[in-house]
Amino acid sequence: MEKKYFKLISLLLILSIFGFAQKAPKNVIFMIGDGMGIAQVYSAMVANGNKLALEQCTYSGFSKTYSNDNFTTDSGAGGTALACGVKTKNGMIGMNPDSVAVESILEKAEKNHLATGIVVACAVTHATPATYIAHQVNRNMYEEIAADYLKTDIDVFIGGGRKYFEDRSDGKNLTNELKAKNYKIAYNLADVKTTTSGKLAGLLYDDQNPGMPERGDQLPESTEAAINILKNNAKGFFLMVEGSQIDWACHANDANKTIKEMLDFDKTIAKVLDFAEKDGNTLVIITADHETGGMTIVNGKMGTDSLTVFYSTKGHSGVPVPVFSYGPGAENFSGFMENTDFKQKIEKLLKLKK
Ligand code: MG
Ligand code: ZN
């Protein structure tokens, strides 16, 4: 080869590698299947005819879920690790083991002028969503956690838990305070779906959301609505979405219900991946805070939900959970990770400064 061509090709190669390495996401959608281990994923895949939307993810890995004081984490410590990047004591929300508040990735994104959101299939005050926005020593402090929503400028939150805002022991009505901060309050899914801009508090149920199939398309459609609002922000957004009740189905050792909750979560994942594919600047990460039930599948028939499933506990197990990722930066979420690694990796990719 002539020397000048070699030089040119080398230069082009260096530029393309450099360009690829520099490809950073503008938006991050972080999806948590509460209690979602490999058996939970596979049970839904089998029942769904050997396919799930999450298979479109291009990278996969594992997250180690042990907490500061327990081999087996709860959703408080598990969520705090994912949201805030610290291992804490079981039951704690957004705090380190010394009860000192630690900033979450959502709060940091908000501070850096990204739009932010939380969409869940449970009360917005429940442990997992709480770890992204609240700082409390105990996950059961639902009214205190509701009040913490007022301390941030989160753009969208949708789930249940209306009573912790409106029917409180201190007599306050926090939805009035939310309205004063220019939030639209939506009490039903139809109102959520017609909102395409501004700030939105979707308090769709008095306490916890119903399970599947009673919940209908609340999670996928709320997620789609949240994306439609958040994508208006030119600086990008951070959205946390939780398939909250996979965990509850597994505490009940109910494989049929687990499959229904998993398929609802996967339907939500399909909508998210569809947006990410079209957008091209959105990183999607799907993982769990822990596995629930010690679920395993010893027999089944592809395309049916008649599986032979065993559980080893009515509680959580200590095994690592799967991680799936898609979009710019997805390659950073493969192999074995600590559950505390996500926050740092995301803030680096989103170039969050302060
Ligand atoms: Mg949860
Ligand atoms: Zn649980």
Image (spheres, grey):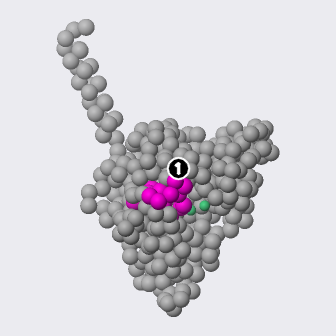
Residue 189 point in image, percent of width and height: 61, 69
- Relative to 206, is 47 above or below? above
Dividing the picture into quarters, in which one does residue 33 lie?
bottom right
Residue 103 point in image, percent of width and height: 35, 64
Residue sitting at x 56%, y 47%? 319
Q: Is residue 81 magenta?
A: yes
Dividing the picture into quarters, in which one does residue 192 lie?
bottom right
User: Residue pushed farthest right?
Assistant: 306
Residue sitting at x 30%, y 61%? 112
Q: Secondary structure at mark 1?
A: strand
Residue sitting at x 36%, y 48%? 345
The magenta-colored residue range is 67-84
User: Residue pushed farthest bottom?
Assistant: 171
Residue sitting at x 34%, y 35%? 20
In this orientation, which residue lies closer to the viewer: 179 or 288?
288
User: Residue pushed farthest top?
Assistant: 1
